[in-house]
Amino acid sequence: MKLDVITLFPELVEQIVAWGVVGRAADRGLLDLVTRNPRDHALDVHRTVDDRPYGGGPGMLMRPEPLAAAIREARESLPSAKVLYLSPQGRVFDQAYAAELAAQPELILLCGRYEGVDERLLAREVDAEVSIGDYVLSGGEPAAMVMVDAIARLLDGALGHSESAEQDSFSDGLLDCPHFTRPEVWEGQAIPAVLKSGDHKAIAKWRRQQALGRTALRRPELLERLELNKEDRRLLAEFSEQPLDG
């Protein structure tokens, strides 16, 4: 995937490809991330990219000219890319959307700052707005980094194990099940016996039940979006009896 991020703080965003899964994806040639600074397209010697809003009000808005020039420059390299603006008014970014975007060969992310950007720029140059949650950040850079991380781990070959992404929380609409590693007993707490049984069918059943139960307890609204089959409903009904050792 080729990904352009338009940002006033390129050094910040570039850190996402310096570490961990995203860094390995970049090293393996699975992800090519480029940053572009709108200040490079400013119209004055002071590299100004913001101005006061018409109609008054607090704060400053990002001017359309530098942003449009940066987007158009990015599109020269990525002609088929959609431009996504990081905005609290956009579509909520979730695992399904991450998978949808990971299937795209090219993508351009636009990071806003100050009180936002000129609406005419959004109408002319932006394909969609995306939000990572109902809260306010100082700019779009942290949100862009979240999106890059979520997308990169879904690229084929990015993770060490091919099933890792498939078993993540939200991959099937549920939260993930609990996980345990050595030691077998830690501070008097033993791991669930089923995980030592070697019975892969029983382990899969236990994990499914835990995922269902944990979702019901912590994020019940997620279950409302799913169509549970008869077996899922039975597992969920039994969950309250033995939530960890069932």
Image (tube, rainbow, N blue to C red):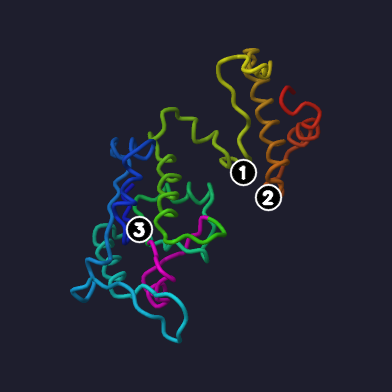
Residue matched to label 3: 108
Q: Amino acid at mark 2?
A: Arg
Q: Are marks 2 and 3 in contact (CB under 8 Å)?
A: no
Secondary-structure class at tag 3: strand
- Mark 3, residues whose alpha carbon is within 10 Å: few (<14), some, or many (≥20)? many
Q: Quadrant of residue 179?
A: top right
Residue 127 picture location, percent across and down: 42, 66
Q: Residue at x 54, y 36 (%)?
A: 168
Which comes before the other along the chain, label 2 or label 1?
1
Q: Is 51 located above or below residue 87 in the figure?
A: below
Q: Quadrant of residue 62?
A: bottom left
Secondary-structure class at tag 1: loop
Q: Are marks 1 and 3 in contact (CB under 8 Å)?
A: no
Residue matched to label 1: 173
Q: Is 144 located above or below residue 211 in the figure?
A: below
Q: Residue at x 29, y 35 (%)?
A: 28
Q: Amino acid at mark 3?
A: Ile
Q: Residue at x 57, y 59 (%)?
A: 134
Residue 82 picture location, percent across and down: 38, 60
Q: Is 30 located above or below residue 74 in the figure?
A: above
Q: Are marks 2 and 1 in contact (CB under 8 Å)?
A: yes
Q: Residue at x 80, y 34 (%)?
A: 237
Residue matched to label 2: 225
The region drawn magenta spans 111-132
Q: Amino acid at mark 1?
A: Gly
Q: CA distance from mark 2 to mark 3?
A: 30 Å
207 magenta-colored = no
Which comes before the other along the chain, label 1 or label 3?
3
Residue 14 picture location, percent across and down: 31, 48
